[in-house]
């Protein structure tokens, strides 16, 4: 019955243990004011993910600080592959078997998400995320501001456009993940707390999953959801 359910996973701090833009900043920032800039990025990330400031504001302010080259992205991808959430690692078969109904919807960037989730049989066509823009000198110049995921309410807007007919389950750690359920485009919101727990998010959840096994156990025993998936 799981094959009749759409699973939407967040990437940063859910599929992986870390926030990728924070790691990219570690890789790419010059030593000048590096620690101060890293603190500023981490604070903006936290405020955006907990709903203290709008997501678009958080992204714009972080991208004013973050720099990087294509080589930096390659370095980042290599690091992210070692930072997949510990409890997800043994479950490649789950992702392979259900790849047709698994999506990654992230406010991060396809440039580094695609190669990481490809190891779990998730095709690029099932990854929805922001994209970097590049300057002539080969450095990141910004991001595509026309992408709905760069804007407030980006995730629910995108899921509405995808127009799923099967039951939808969202698994994530951030307020932007909860917004999909809040706006009526998901049947369940599971707050995923293996890597970070945000009170403003967990209080909105249908269930709080402390790891991937916990998530699987909950889904396998949600009779109402499974019944809906049969219809």
Image: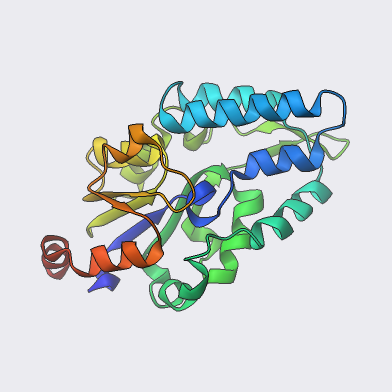
Quadrant of the rendered structure where residue 144 is? Answer: top right
> Is residue 144 depicted above or below 195 in this figure?
above
Q: Position of residue 172 (x, y in %)?
A: 40, 48
Quadrant of the rendered structure where residue 21 is? Answer: top right
Instruction: State the count of labels.
Output: 0
> Is residue 56 depicted above or below 76 in this figure?
above
Taking depth in this image into account, of 164 and 220 the one nearest to the observer is 220
> Is residue 150 depicted above or below 168 in this figure?
above
Q: Residue at x 26, y 38 (%)?
A: 204
Q: Is residue 117 left or right of residue 102?
A: right
Q: Position of residue 104 (x, y in %)?
A: 46, 54
Q: Position of residue 75 (x, y in %)?
A: 78, 54
Q: Position of residue 43 (x, y in %)?
A: 58, 26
Q: Is residue 82 left or right of residue 27?
A: left
Taking depth in this image into account, of 219 and 117 the one nearest to the observer is 219
Where the C terminus falls, by quadrant?
bottom left
Q: Residue at x 58, y 67 (%)?
A: 118
Q: Is residue 165 left or right of residue 130?
A: left
> Is residue 20 depicted above or below 150 in this figure?
below
Q: Residue at x 47, y 44 (%)?
A: 196
Q: How is the image coloured?
A: rainbow
Q: Residue at x 47, y 66 (%)?
A: 87
Taking depth in this image into account, of 35 and 142 the one nearest to the observer is 35
Where the N terminus falls, by quadrant?
bottom left
Taking depth in this image into account, of 12 and 179 the one nearest to the observer is 12
């Amino acid at each position: 019955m799981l094959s009749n359910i759409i699973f939407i996973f967040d990437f940063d701090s859910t599929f992986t243990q870390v926030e990728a833009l924070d790691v990219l900043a570690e890789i790419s920032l010059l030593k000048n004011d590096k620690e101060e800039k890293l603190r500023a990025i981490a604070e903006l990330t936290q405020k955006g993910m907990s709903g203290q400031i709008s997501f678009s504001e958080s992204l714009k302010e972080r991208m004013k600080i973050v720099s990087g080259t294509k080589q930096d992205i390659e370095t980042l991808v290599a690091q992210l592959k070692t930072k997949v959430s510990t409890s997800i690692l043994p479950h490649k078969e789950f992702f392979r078997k259900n790849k047709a109904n698994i999506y990654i919807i992230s406010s991060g960037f396809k440039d580094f998400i695609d190669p990481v989730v490809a190891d779990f049989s998730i095709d690029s066509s099932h990854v929805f995320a922001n994209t970097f823009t590049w300057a002539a000198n080969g450095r990141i110049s910004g991001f595509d501001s026309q992408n709905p995921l760069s804007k407030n309410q980006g995730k629910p807007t995108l899921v509405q456009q995808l127009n799923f007919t099967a039951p939808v389950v969202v698994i994530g750690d951030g307020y932007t993940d909860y917004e999909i359920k809040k706006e009526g485009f998901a049947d369940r919101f599971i707050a995923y707390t293996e890597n970070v727990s945000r009170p403003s998010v967990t209080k909105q959840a249908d269930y709080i999953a402390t790891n991937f096994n916990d998530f699987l156990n909950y889904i396998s025993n949600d009779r109402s959801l499974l019944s809906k998936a049969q219809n």
